[in-house]
Image: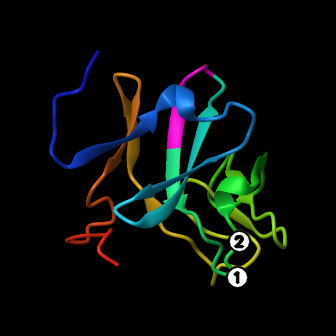
């Protein structure tokens, strides 16, 4: 069923544009580089995750990294993307690096609506998270 139109949600891509092989897709939204991932839970439900594409350690492209299950304190069944430059993991739901809590990438609220991946424009509560 289609969700009601909402000006806070914006189309990023079709769900079919996302790789299904534990890889991400690089996109830009309002000039901001983003990494978009698709996962499927144990019940066959599809989930999408959107985070900043740049690793805070050395600027590696997270969309080029592979997804892997990785223990994250307080998050059962966590999935991390592994930065291809130096192997740093980042939880795709929270942006947190389980190996070093001081390191985090920004995440954005995302959903699938009528086969489109959408991002919420103020997902972190900022007036304009894409302004800088």
Identity of the residue drawn at 24% across and 70% down: 128
Query: Is residue 107 toward the left or the right of residue 99 in the image?
Result: left
Query: Is residue 44 toward the left or the right of residue 98 in the image?
Result: left
Q: Is residue 47 magenta?
A: yes
Tell me how far mark 2 sits from mark 1, CA to CA.
8 Å
Identity of the residue drawn at 75% across and 65% down: 83
Residue 132, image quadrant: bottom left
Residue 84, image quadrant: bottom right
Is residue 77 or residue 14 the one in the foreground? 14
Is residue 73 visible to the viewer in this orientation of the structure? no
* Residue 81 percent location from the top left of the image: 71, 56
In magenta, the rendered stretch is 43-48
Query: Is residue 24 toward the left or the right of residue 86 in the image?
Result: left
* Residue 22 percent location from the top left of the image: 74, 40
* Residue at the limit of the structure toward the right, as seen here: 86
- Give above or below for 46 relative to 111: above
> Mark 2–mark 1 contact, CB under 8 Å?
yes
């Amino acid at each position: 069923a289609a969700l009601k139109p909402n000006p806070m949600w914006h189309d990023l891509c079709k769900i079919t544009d996302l790789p299904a092989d534990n890889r991400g897709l690089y996109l830009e939204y309002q000039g901001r580089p983003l990494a978009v991932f698709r996962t499927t839970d144990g019940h066959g439900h599809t989930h999408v995750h959107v985070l900043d594409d740049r690793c805070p350690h050395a600027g590696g492209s997270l969309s080029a990294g592979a997804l892997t299950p990785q223990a994250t304190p307080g998050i059962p069944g966590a999935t991390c993307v592994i930065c291809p430059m130096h192997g740093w993991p980042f939880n795709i739901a929270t942006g947190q690096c389980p190996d070093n809590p001081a390191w985090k990438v920004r995440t954005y609220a995302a959903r699938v609506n009528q086969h489109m991946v959408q991002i919420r424009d103020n997902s972190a509560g900022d007036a304009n998270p894409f302004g800088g």
